[in-house]
Amino acid sequence: MDFSTKLYFITDSSNYEEDEFLARVESALQGGVTIMQLREKNKTTREYIDLAQKVHEITKKYNVPLIIDDRVDVMLAVDAEGVHVGAEDMPLSMARKIIGKDKILGATTKTVPAAKAAVSAGADYLGVGAIYPTTTKVKTILTSTETLNDICNTVSIPVNAIGGLNADNLDVLKGIDIAGVCAVSAIMKADSPKAAAAGLLKAFERMQG
């Protein structure tokens, strides 16, 4: 499946009523998000599936692939375009076997050996970080830009930087061959997710240029 990870939006529904959350998702997509991950840590399976169905209706409208965080079962239930698994989730090779070759499989890695292993196990893209401290996860282990650069130079699949990134602090990534940036709070908590997404995309393209 062809996809671009240039602007990878990861959701956080905490503190929002469902209608407001869905409106923010749509606003972000209008701003130029190229791929989106629905991340829910505290919902029951049924609640997760219900929300994923509603979100998928919106992402399909904008032709943006929907990635489900952690949960292969939820991904299959709503026929989302892919799943993202972290180091403590289902083994990548197992996830690939279950979802088949035509779905997108993403992985989180923090070291060159882990990145190589993820590629061997069938990952289609990597999220590497955290580059800056982040408010969305309690445990934040920072990844140096040197390590990010090494991973980019080692693997042949798209690598995205993640962790506290916004339109004003991307310069630290200049010269590193990343495929895109991941953002949670910078878009989710913005007054206008659309404007925030557009600004982040512009900043990334400017940095690459």
Image (spheres, grey):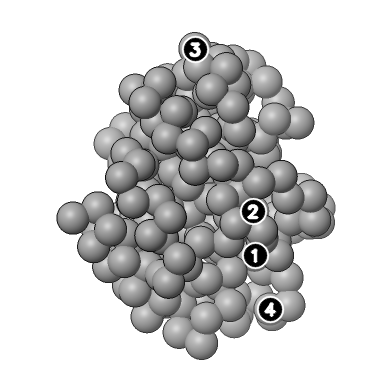
Q: Residues within 10 Å of mark 2 (few under 14, many from 20)?
A: many
Q: Which mark is residue 12?
A: 1
Q: Is residue 147 left or right of residue 46?
A: left
Q: Which mark is residue 120?
A: 3
- The image quadrant where one finds the N terminus is top left
- In the rendered image, residue 206, in percent from the top left (x then y), is placed at 23, 62
Where disc 4 sits, the SS reads: loop
Badge nearest the viewer, 3 or 2: 3
Q: Amino acid at mark 3?
A: Ser
3D distance between C-alphas at marks 1 and 3: 30 Å
Query: Where does residue 116 sit, x and y in percent of width and height?
Result: 50, 17
Instruction: Kindly identify which numbered label has been placed on residue 39.
Output: 2
> Which element type, helix, strand or loop, lies under badge 1?
loop
- Label 1 to label 4: alpha-carbon separation: 9 Å
Please name the residue that numbered disc 4 is placed on.
Answer: 16
Image quarter where the C terminus lies is bottom left
Q: Amino acid at mark 2?
A: Arg
Which one is nearer the viewer's eye here, 92 or 163? 163
Circle 4: is it few (<14), some (14-19), or many (20+) Cα within 10 Å? few
